[in-house]
Image (tube, rainbow, N blue to C red):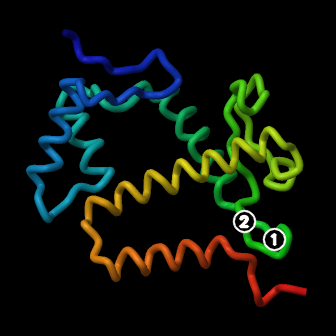
Amino acid sequence: MEPTTDFDDEQQNWSLNSDAVQAAIRFIRKQGKKGVTAEDLVAWDAKHGKRLFRWNDERAAQDWRIHQARLFLNSFRGIFERMRVRKFMQIPANEDTGLTTAVYLDTQTISEDTKLRGWAIDNLTRKMQSLASELRFWKLTDDERKRVLLLLEASLMPDQRNAA
């Protein structure tokens, strides 16, 4: 199979079944405690067939600008109902949201729309479940688990300092 030096699709699909992905994982594991930087992985891919990342300079530059725009939109926080929250959220186009195009929306706009609010809560809950599954790997002690649950419960409570 000829190495792919560019991708037709909008985003890369890094399947664990891919030979290129498996080779990259072996490279990362070989580094042990030294670890790998993003720059190390790009250099490794350049030497091993350019199969992980987009190497067409024009497309890569456009992808980078889009990535920077996402970083820009994800970097803002605002005060809403006396709480510091993300200013914008990316909302996908699907039946749950009722949108036909994925867009970033202001958090207040999302909170005022029943469908979008429901999607946002479900999405945040899925992220919390995923993080909780990662904690399971660490085989928390009872005290560690209690501490995590207390912190989570406290973060869900209204801010008592700002109560009227």
Instruction: Where is residue 46? Give x, y as percent.
Output: 25, 34
Q: Is residue 50 above or below residue 111?
A: above
Q: Is residue 118 above or below residue 48?
A: below
Circle 1 residues within 10 Å: few <14, some 14–19, many ≥20: few
Residue occupying image coordinates x 53% and y 23%: 10
Measure how far apart labels 2 and 1 are at the Cα level.
Answer: 6 Å
- SS for callout 1: strand
- Of all residues, the one furthest to the bottom in this rendering is 161
Q: In the rendered view of the protein, which quadrant contains the N terminus?
A: top left
Q: Mark 2 points at which residue?
A: 85
Instruction: Where is residue 3? Give x, y as percent.
Output: 24, 17
Task: Tell me the amino acid under the disc marked 2.
Answer: Val
Instruction: Where is residue 90? Give x, y as percent.
Output: 68, 43
Left or right: where does residue 127 sit relative to residue 97?
left
Left or right: where does residue 39 sit relative to residue 24?
right
* Front in this rendered view, residue 58 or 143: 143
Task: Tell me the amino acid under the disc marked 1.
Answer: Ile
* Front in this rendered view, residue 164 or 30: 164
Instruction: Where is residue 24? Give x, y as percent.
Output: 20, 38
Quarter-of-image position of residue 62? top right
Marks 2 & 1, CB-CB < 8 Å contact: yes
Residue occupying image coordinates x 12% and y 55%: 31
* Front in this rendered view, residue 124 or 91: 124
Q: In the rendered view of the protein, which quadrant contains the C terminus?
A: bottom right
> If you read the primary sequence from the N terminus, does the residue marked by circle 2 or circle 1 appear first?
1
Q: Is residue 78 above or below residue 45?
A: below
- SS for callout 2: strand
Q: Name the residue under label 1.
A: 79
Circle 2 residues within 10 Å: few <14, some 14–19, many ≥20: some
Q: Is residue 6 above or below residue 142?
A: above
